[in-house]
Image (tube, rainbow, N blue to C red):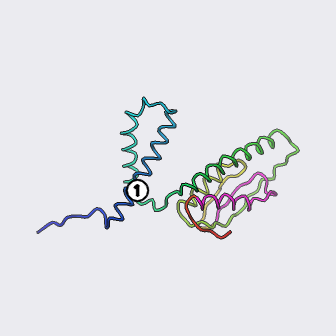
Amino acid sequence: MKLGRTRLFASDRTVRSFVRQGLWRAIALALLWWILLEGDRKGWWYGLPVIAAATATSLWLAPEAGQFWHPVGLVRFISFFLWQSLRGGIDVALRAIDPRLPLHPQLIEYRLRVPVGPAQIVLMNTISLLPGTLSVALHPMLLQVHVLDGRMDVQRSLQQVEAVVAELFEIAIEQ
């Protein structure tokens, strides 16, 4: 009985995709390591093997990421997130200090336009990290969100967040 040579990848394209995913993951982990070290070069002797092991582990655990963050979308997402966090944090702080600013908590349902998968997870987590909102439950194309003031135009705000997340993943959604 002759044993055939087992192919790890179906095509060269699969190899390129695998290498590209590994490279992007390694870059992201290196950037995170650099931030944690606050720019100090002394910890790289330890960080490089850790980054390599973490990259290999992530490729083993999740070999097919399938969707990459678009660089322009990532910049827009980060700037949007930081600005909305600042605005929301100020709003929540003012509501805590000034009793004239009412709280009207409400549970709303939001119809999702991004497909099931990583984009929905990022959207749900982003909404939960923004002050005044908390993702409660995720169903295939429906998200339940708790808001501090249901009288505000929450649907429009959620559409803005979803549009930014869609741009991050290069997903076309209806406006």
Residue highlighted by disc 1: 20
Quadrant for the N terminus in the image:
bottom left
Give the amino acid type for the residue marked by disc 1 in the picture: Arg
Seen from the viewer's position, the closer of residues 143 and 127 is: 127
The extreme front residue here reads 72
In the image, is residue 154 part of the stretch drawn in magenta? yes
Q: Residues within 10 Å of mark 1 (few under 14, many from 20)?
A: few
What is the secondary structure assignment of the residue under circle 1? helix
Estimate the x, y position of residue 163 in percent, counting from the top left.
Answer: 65, 61
Estimate the x, y position of residue 54 in percent, counting from the top left.
Answer: 40, 45
Estimate the x, y position of residue 63 in percent, counting from the top left.
Answer: 39, 58
Q: Count of labels shown?
A: 1
User: Residue at 79% of width from left, 53% of height from top?
Assistant: 149
Q: Is residue 144 left or right of residue 8?
A: right
Estimate the x, y position of residue 166 in percent, counting from the top left.
Answer: 60, 62
User: Residue at 47% of width from left, 47% of height from top?
Assistant: 28
User: Residue at 60% of width from left, 53% of height from top?
Assistant: 125
When asked about the image quadrant of residue 19, the answer is bottom left
Q: Is residue 75 left or right of residue 1?
A: right
The extreme right residue here reads 100
The extreme bottom residue here reads 174
Quadrant for the C terminus in the image:
bottom right
Magenta residues, start to end: 142-167
Q: Is residue 168 left or right of residue 54?
A: right
In the image, is residue 157 part of the stretch drawn in magenta? yes
When asked about the image quadrant of residue 93, the answer is top right
User: Residue at 76% of width from left, 44% of height from top?
Assistant: 92
The extreme left residue here reads 1
When asked about the image quadrant of residue 52, the answer is top left
169 versus 1 height, above or below: above
